[in-house]
Amino acid sequence: CVYVCVKFQFTKLLFNEDEKHGVHIVGSAIETFLLEKSRVNFQTKGERNYHVFYQLIAGLDKAKKKELGLEGGCRSFYYTSQSGCDTVKGIPDKDR
């Protein structure tokens, strides 16, 4: 028997592999998190939400940004410009 633990952002899966049964899940754990209602429709000064959007814009080349209508960057959208914060120290958006 071989046990393998795989971690995702909010989930852990434990797999067992043996010659007779192959690979199957033998355990799992899911972490939950609270999404504050205030974060869904408003950004506080100096904070940003939905980091993946900033990372997407930072990682696209100019042609792709134009194709997707994102050439103005985060500041061209009302929601992502409310806080005045485009970057977070220590998070390299382009590399994500």
Image: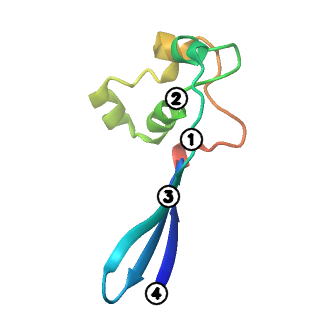
Q: Mark 2–mark 3 contact, CB under 8 Å?
A: no
**Dots 2 and 4: beta carbons under 8 Å?**
no
Which disc is residue 13 wearing?
none
- Element marked by disc 2: loop
Gap in angstroms between the C-alphas marked 3 and 4: 18 Å
Residue 88 found in image quarter: top right
Q: Residue at x 41, y 39 (%)?
A: 60
Say which of marks 2 and 4 sits in front: 4
Residue labelled with disc 3: 28
Answer whether labels 1 and 3 touch (C-beta < 8 Å).
no
Sequence order check: which comes first, mark 2 or mark 3? 3
Graded by Cα atoms within 10 Å as few (under 14), some (14 to 19) or many (20 or more), the crowding at tag 1 reads some
Question: Which residue, given by chain and number where applicable, does mark 2 sit on?
Answer: 50
65 or 21, which lies in front? 21
**Amino acid under disc 3:** Ser
3D distance between C-alphas at marks 2 and 3: 27 Å
Q: Label 2 is placed on what type of residue?
A: Tyr
Q: Position of residue 12 (x, y in %)?
A: 52, 58
| Camera sees residue 12 | no
In the picture, measured across the screen, residue 60 lies left or right of residue 58, that is left
For residue 1, which numbered disc appears in the image?
4
User: Label 2 vs label 4: CA separation?
Assistant: 41 Å
Which circle, 2 or 3, is nearer the viewer?
Answer: 3
Secondary structure of residue under mark 4: loop
Mark 1 vs mark 4: give the one in front.
4
- Which comes sooner in the sequence, label 2 or label 4? 4
Mark before the other along the chain sequence, 3 or 4: 4
Viewer-side residue, 51 vs 14: 14
Instruction: Please tell me whether mark 3 sits on a helix, a strand or a loop.
Output: strand
